[in-house]
Image (cartoon, rainbow, N blue to C red):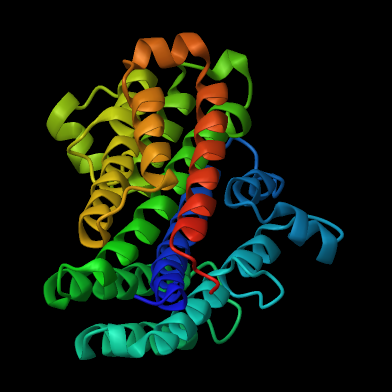
Amino acid sequence: MLGKTANGLFWMYRYLERAENTSRLVETGQRIALTRLDSSDGEWLSIMQTAGVADGYLAHHDEVTKEAAIDWMLRARDNPSSVLSTISEARQNARLVRTALTHDVWEAMNGCYMKVRGALARRVNERDLPAAIDCIQQHTALVRGTTQGTMLRNDIFNFARIGTYLERADNIARILDVKYYVLLPGVQSVGSSIDNVQWETILRSVSARGGFRMVHGNQASPVDIANFLILDRRMPRSLRFSITKIRDNLDYLASDYGARLESHAQVETLVHRFLSHDIDAIFDYGLHEYLQDLLGALAGLGRQIEIDYRFYE
């Protein structure tokens, strides 16, 4: 496969996953705001920090307001990570690799772009926000489902999956990190009813609430939730699940091309370093430090994959 084709597939699915994840963060911000005793719009700064878009927002706005923050994350063209921008980039990459996609995947991607663009054609008010978020999540899921159901399991599929799961792992790590170090009102709130409500909101934001209750019941402790989102191999948005899928698809590429490259060594190191400890050891090390180290390792792995498979040649 040409490097530029691999690049297009990798980034098509990264952008698609990023669009959905951004919509989930907006939904999370809306839910967490409802648990606050005050109605400070400054809450949204922490949500934008999670998404990595706060600096861009502050460069274009003098103050943080809920309405402006939601608009920045959903539809601002000056924000390259807004849902509208990333869906547009996903479609553009899909056009570049059109011959590598099945007809069904292309139609799903094109339909996703058209529907989301329509839903975000104008500023979304609070009443219409749930419907807009549902539209984004349903149509990005449709592209993934069509990919699963129609694509040949070859190198094309592997690059698509690697892009998806790199972005997903990055997103889960960011959500967990901001929960502990930004969203809590103060140390005195840890373990309180407001803390528990916010942890419940985090589970909802990654569609993990039902799965968590199947495993742990109705009692939600921060340690159990962190363990579920970091180490549970059955949870499709956990860090372990995502990183394991990256390793598996890199292994398939190694088999296809008959060569193991630096990225294969890096992912094995990443698995050993971050997934071989239990949750107590992670908390003893420091959850923030663990997540920051992991985010750096994931970024390095992404860069190495681009080098190994010559994305820009």
Where is residue 67? Give x, y as percent. Answer: 66, 64
Q: Is residue 238 above or below residue 252?
A: above
Where is residue 28? Give x, y as percent. Answer: 47, 49
From where the camera sits, is residue 35 visible?
Answer: no
On the picture, is 58 further left or further right than 9? right
Nearer to the camera, 155 or 79: 155
Where is residue 186? Give x, y as percent. Answer: 63, 21
Question: Who's the residue at 15% across and 29% down the image?
Answer: 215
**Residue 305 occupies quadrant:** bottom left
Where is residue 263? Give x, y as percent. Answer: 42, 46
Q: Is residue 129 above or below residue 218?
A: below
On the picture, is 173 further left or further right than 249? right
Question: Who's the residue at 46% across and 69% down the image?
Answer: 11
Outermost residue toward the front in this view: 258
Q: Which image quarter holds the N terminus?
A: bottom left
Nearer to the camera, 139 or 34: 139
Outermost residue toward the right in this view: 62
On the picture, is 3 further left or further right than 165? right
Q: Is residue 78 above or below residue 234?
A: below
Question: Who's the residue at 67% across and 56% down the image?
Answer: 53
Nearer to the camera, 294 or 255: 255
